[in-house]
Image: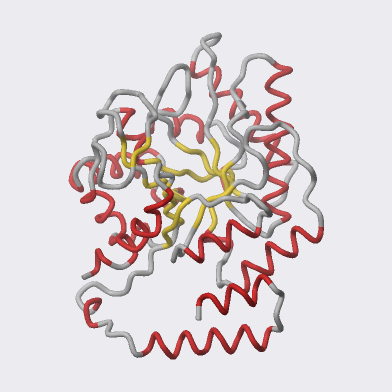
Amino acid sequence: MIEKLLSAVKENTTKEVVLNVIVNMLLALILIDISCFEDYGSPMHMIGPHTSIAGGIQNAVIQAYELGASAFGMFTKNQRQWVAKPLEEEMIFLFTDTMKKLGFSSDQVLVHDSYLINLGNPDSEKREKSLNAFIDELKRVEQLGLTLLNFHPGSHVNQIEAKDSLHLVAQSLDIALSETESAIAVIENTAGQGSNLGSSFEELAYLLEHCTHQDRIGFCIDTCHAHAAGYDMSTPETFESAIQRFDELIGLNRLRGMHLNDAKSEKGSHLDRHESLGKGTIGWPTFEYIAKDERFASIPLVLETINSEIWKEEVQHLRFEVWK
């Protein structure tokens, strides 16, 4: 039935046919024994990997569906290039139509911006180039009917103090948000590698404090980055200590997404090295804890793990097996 639905989407089959396939799927699901969920509720968390836009941005949605995901991350352009071809009406329609047909909403998608952007660069020309690219990223999110744009705070490139660079990021965010309409700028914590900003929750809170458009500021916690930055993620108890600190400084209501990544490196190493879930220095218990915690049920939990061949297994484990 899944193959039929995907075929209908790709061939732009009539809505009646697609609805018929969906009804048949739902009827089949009714027959599934869900008694294993009685003690815990249902696996409603939004979980999935960062999927590919190769061949068309709508393919990110299709790949997520094929993997059994209930959320996904994506780029809206080549993340290694400054300038992208504008989104055409046909591209936007294909994306939004695929989202509708496969049952995804904007809340389930965490877009990531280009890795080239550095809003904290002390060089005014380079910072302006980054700002223009960031504004374009926000507008692309809005054009696609999406909400969340995840980004790294930037770097002081060892030329100015971290707080001065954070001020530049805040100024850039104020400009970018004033020139766009609705997209949420979701600030991701970093591992603290080199001169990168945002490895501590204190720095993230400082950045928030100096932003004017705080109603359009959110945050994303990357478990690998947090672990590498010195926040112990290796047990549910130590993860809880870290999340309580985030709540005290920033507030869990501002957490708009998470990146669920195991870590190759040790706690406090400041090395950003992702690993498959359960195969690194964090381990399965923390990810299972997150996947069953109702506080994280309404935000996209996106995997950026290194082996795409086992994404389906990782998603299946977090969405269903943890409830057994």
- How far across and how far down the image is residue 188, in percent? 47, 38
Q: Residue at x 74, y 59 (%)?
A: 92
- Report the side of 186 relative to 39 (left or right): right
Q: Which residue is drawn at 69% across and 57% down?
A: 144
- Report the side of 140 relative to 313 (left or right): right
Examine the image and state in which quarter residue 238 appears.
Answer: top left
- Report the side of 285 relative to 118 (left or right): left
Residue in front for this viewpoint, 272 or 205: 272
Q: Residue at x 28, y 62 (%)?
A: 292
Residue in front for this viewpoint, 75 or 192: 75
- How far across and how far down the image is residue 153, in percent? 53, 30
- How far across and how far down the image is residue 279, in percent? 26, 42
- How far across and how far down the image is residue 205, in percent? 44, 34
Residue in front for this viewpoint, 205 or 103: 103
Q: Give the colouring mode of the picture.
A: secondary structure
Residue in front for this viewpoint, 270 or 187: 270
